[in-house]
Amino acid sequence: MRSGTWIGLLVVTALVAIPALAADRVQVFDLPAGAHPHDAAPAPDGKIWYTAQAQGALGILDPATGAVEQVALGDGSAPHGVIPGPDGKAWITDGGQNAIVSFDPAARKVTAYPLPEDRAYANLNTAAFDGAGILWFTGQSGIYGRLDPASGKIEVFDAPKGRGPYGITATPDGEIYFASLAGSYVGHVDTKTGEATVIEPPTPRQGARRVWADSKGNVWVSEWNAGQISRYTPSTGAWRSWRLPGDQPRAYAVYVDDKDMVWLSDFGTNAVLRFDPATETFTSFPGSAPGAEVRQINGRPGAIFAPESGIDRLMVVRSDAG
């Protein structure tokens, strides 16, 4: 475990107008040039955290003012995912440092938890906390693992089928599921033993990329190769799938909001989509410019966050926008 002091960059950004959408529904913020914002998450104080993957930093955006801080995470850092922890810290999967990294906003302290030396370059992706407060994470090189924040102990497990673990989620009752992009399956983790059980989606070679649980414990899966969104119901084992609109959809991110609306990013149409499971309809929110490349979606009640990695912006959509 390594700790460091805070080093920051302060940038005041401008609100970018999108003529096609009403200003009271969508806001877009410029981020530092070259940041390549990958994932985003709600901070406890109303701000938005994002990973500046290309600049080795955690970004902090104040949507009320447009002000941005960037916190350096360490030598060689290339952060991928960020989530809020039950302790109020930002928890980051840092592929460049091959470590889980936390940022304590109260103490302005960065702490790194390196993976074991025999697990070099796990290609860390995303993380989620289970019901006991243990952090679970994925690595595309073919691993998943857990970190006990109280002790700093890390355990790493070999994933079924090797390479591919990518998105990960916790259900309301604390169960952990992850998606394997290369393996085209969903894994259910036994949080006591660490063993993962493979759950096969009905569409072959679908490219399960990210997962998110809704309030009922259903697991929603963005399927990159198939261009569709699927829902797995653990209580029955049932699956349902819906193809995204357009000729060549590419479903990357998936996020379920507080009203159980499902949000997706589609590289095929350069848009964020909202899917209503009740009506089985999609609503499109175009990217703020060509090549937006929204790689992850997160949010808080009333708003969703879509980091536009390809153009160094972060889009905030009012989640009840029609």
Image (tube, rainbow, N blue to C red):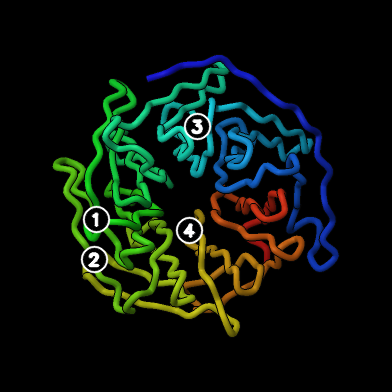
**Residue at the location (74% across, 58% down)?**
25
**Disc 3, SS:** strand
Q: Residues within 10 Å of mark 1 (few under 14, many from 20)?
A: many
Q: Residue at x 43, y 47 (%)?
A: 125
User: Would you name the residue on which mark 1 appears?
Assistant: 188
Q: Earlier in the sequence, mark 2 or mark 4?
A: 2
| Crowding at mark 4 (Cα within 10 Å: few <14, some 14-19, many 20+) | many
Q: CA distance from mark 3 to mark 4?
A: 20 Å
**How dense is the environment of label 3, judged by Cα within 10 Å: few (below 14), some, or many (20 and up)?**
many
Q: In the image, is 316 to the left or to the right of 127? A: right
Does the image show residue 303? no
Give the labeled residue for mark 4.
256
The residue pinned by badge 3 equals 90
- Which numbered marker is on residue 122? none
Three-letter amino acid code of the residue under disc 1: His
Of callouts 3 and 1, which one flags the residue occurring earlier in the amino acid sequence?
Answer: 3
Check the image and report above or below for 53 versus 162: above
Q: Secondary structure at mark 1?
A: strand
Q: Are marks 1 and 2 in contact (CB under 8 Å)?
A: yes
